[in-house]
Amino acid sequence: MKRSRHEVARWRMKRQKRVKQIRWLEAQSRRHRQLQIFRCRFASERRRSILFISA
């Protein structure tokens, strides 16, 4: 059964939107992971420096 051009276009747009959403979410999680790594590293450096100051 042949689909109308409007139907096909609507499906294509929906799929495009979904792909964009997925890519955005992946990018967000990647950014979040980078932030977590940075915070963890910064906190450990601060802890280490406090140890050396108090000793």
Image (spheres, rainbow, N blue to C red):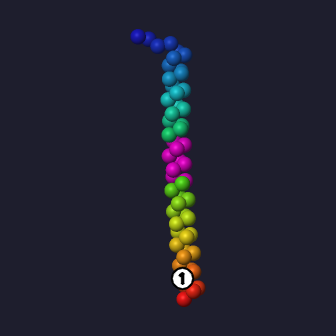
Q: x, y (%) of residue 51?
A: 54, 82
Quadrant in the picture for the C terminus: bottom right
Q: Main secondary structure of the magenta part?
A: helix
Is 20 above or below relative to 1?
below
The residue depicted at 57 percent of the width and 75 percent of the height is: 46
Q: Which residue is mark 1?
A: 51
Residue in front for this viewpoint, 52 or 6: 52
Residue reaching furthest to the left: 1
Q: Which residues are magenta?
A: 23-31
Q: x, y (%) of residue 8?
A: 50, 19
The residue depicted at 51 percent of the width and 50 percent of the height is: 29
Query: Could you tell whether 16 is left or right of 2 in the image?
Result: right
Identified by mark 1, the residue type is Leu
Quadrant in the picture for residue 1: top left
Q: Secondary structure at mark 1?
A: helix
The question of residue 27 being in magenta is answered with yes
Q: x, y (%) of residue 12?
A: 51, 25
Residue reaching furthest to the front: 54
